[in-house]
């Protein structure tokens, strides 16, 4: 979006507000916001998308930089990127939908639905809140090339991981310990209960009710021509250590000062497989900010944002799907996602009625710093 278009969009939105003082300062505010975005965009090539929304719709949508450095293809609002762990919120929503339907109970042991090598007392709630004690080995190698998806066997990949990492780290519910394996297991539970693949269930019960099309958000690269390449900075410690972190098939060619990452899918869609646009994710945030959600009952939406506790009744900075943070004295809920060539984060500020999403096609992009700097302009 060009500088004038961005400022004008914010100005038109502000004219709908009631406070005269806000209308008087909107154009300068818009210029300041736009300048901040561009100041971030210049040094963080290749590119990014940034969307701010409320329950009524999009307040600001910015897309800039490059989706393909070699070809000079620009990032647009329609460019898809890998969301990685932002997917976990989708998984949590799907589980709570099945609770709404009476097909699951949060405090049931997961062994009722699938076999696993861990403590038999682990519950669905504990998987959602990352208090199960299931380990979290580095998942960087849990990927396969996008063009191999038709022959990839997810169940076999999961069984291999479970066999290698079969010991629980602590008693279920005792403390917080992030676990990608835990959310991979949640995906298997969704499949067992719904009779559908994880991707098919989420598309039917989350994306379709919100009119999100496959080319906007899916678990595969639907339109390769509109998908951004992921990049790793050439002169970085991660680039030096890349052979120890990921398999060789992941690495593409250098494009200037950037190493292109080949298109990959995660081995487990439910812990990080979503691929889409910031605008598509913002539609989910809009629904969660509405008076009544389309995809969740009022009770389940409350659960999605309710702070979790350990067995000893100690609060943790986690809900059943979101992490909890504070910026400038304002509490927010967030989910960050990062992996091969991409980094993203989405937030909900319930007290302000605002949601934000940023997605960038660079592994080392600092999404937290970006949102802490930009979001404050919309929280005043």
Image: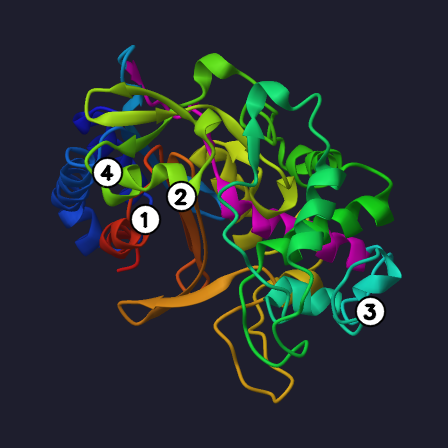
In percent of width and height, residue 93 lies at 66, 52
Disc on the earlier residue, 4 or 1 = 4
Query: Do callouts 1 and 3 mark residues in contact (Cβ within 8 Å)?
Result: no
Which residue is at the front of the view, 13 or 199? Answer: 199
Please report the bounds of the magenta region as a residue range. 73-100
Q: Which mark is residue 37?
A: none
Q: Nearer the viewer, mark 4 or mark 1?
A: 1
Disc on the earlier residue, 4 or 3 = 4
Q: Is residue 109 magenta?
A: no
Which secondary structure lies at badge 1?
helix
The residue that appears at 14% across and 49% down in the rendered structure is: 25
Residue carrying label 1? 367
In percent of width and height, residue 199 lies at 70, 35
In percent of width and height, residue 317 lies at 48, 72
Q: CA distance from mark 2 to mark 1?
A: 6 Å
- Indicate whether 29 appears above or below 351: above
Q: Judge the density around disc 3: few (<14), some (14-19), many (≥20) Cα neighbours within 10 Å.
A: some
Query: Do callouts 2 and 1 mark residues in contact (Cβ within 8 Å)?
Result: yes
Residue carrying label 4? 11
Residue carrying label 2? 344
In percent of width and height, residue 284 lies at 55, 44
Residue carrying label 3? 108
Query: Do callouts 4 and 3 mark residues in contact (Cβ within 8 Å)?
Result: no
Disc on the earlier residue, 1 or 3 = 3
Disc on the earlier residue, 2 or 1 = 2
Do we see residue 293 in this rendering? no
| Location of residue 237 by image quarter | top left
Q: Name the residue furthest bottom.
A: 312
């Amino acid at each position: 979006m060009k500088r004038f278009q961005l400022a004008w969009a914010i100005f038109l939105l502000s004219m709908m507000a009631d406070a005269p003082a806000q209308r008087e300062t909107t154009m300068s505010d818009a210029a300041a916001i736009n300048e901040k975005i561009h100041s971030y965009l210049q040094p963080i090539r290749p590119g990014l998308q940034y969307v701010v929304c409320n329950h009524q719709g999009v307040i600001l949508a910015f897309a800039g930089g490059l989706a393909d450095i070699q070809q000079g293809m620009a990032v647009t609002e329609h460019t898809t990127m890998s969301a990685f762990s932002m997917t976990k919120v989708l998984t949590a929503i799907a589980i709570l939908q099945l609770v709404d339907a009476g097909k699951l109970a949060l405090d049931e042991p997961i062994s009722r639905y699938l076999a696993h090598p861990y403590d038999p007392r682990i519950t669905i709630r504990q998987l959602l809140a990352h208090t199960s004690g299931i380990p979290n080995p580095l998942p960087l190698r849990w990927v396969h090339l996008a063009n191999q998806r038709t022959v990839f066997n997810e169940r076999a990949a999961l069984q291999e991981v479970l066999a290698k990492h079969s010991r629980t780290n602590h008693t279920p519910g005792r403390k917080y310990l992030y676990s990608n394996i835990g959310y991979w297991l949640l995906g298997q539970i969704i499949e067992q209960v719904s009779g559908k693949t994880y991707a098919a269930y989420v598309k039917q019960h989350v994306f379709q009710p919100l009119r999100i099309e496959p080319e906007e958000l899916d678990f595969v690269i639907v339109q390769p021509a509109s998908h951004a390449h992921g990049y790793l900075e050439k002169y970085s410690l991660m680039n030096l250590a890349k052979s120890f972190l990921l398999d060789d098939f992941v690495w593409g060619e250098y494009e200037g000062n950037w190493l292109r990452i080949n298109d990959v899918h995660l081995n487990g869609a439910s812990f990080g497989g979503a691929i889409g646009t910031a605008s598509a994710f913002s539609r989910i945030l809009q629904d969660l900010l509405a008076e009544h959600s389309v995809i969740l009952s009022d009770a389940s939406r409350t659960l999605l944002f309710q702070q979790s506790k350990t067995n000893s009744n100690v609060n943790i900075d986690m809900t059943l799907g979101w992490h909890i943070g504070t910026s400038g004295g304002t509490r927010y809920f967030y989910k960050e996602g990062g992996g091969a060539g991409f980094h993203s984060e989405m937030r909900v500020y319930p007290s302000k009625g605002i949601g934000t999403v940023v997605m960038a096609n660079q592994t080392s992009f600092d999404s937290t710093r970006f949102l802490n700097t930009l979001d404050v302009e919309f929280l005043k």
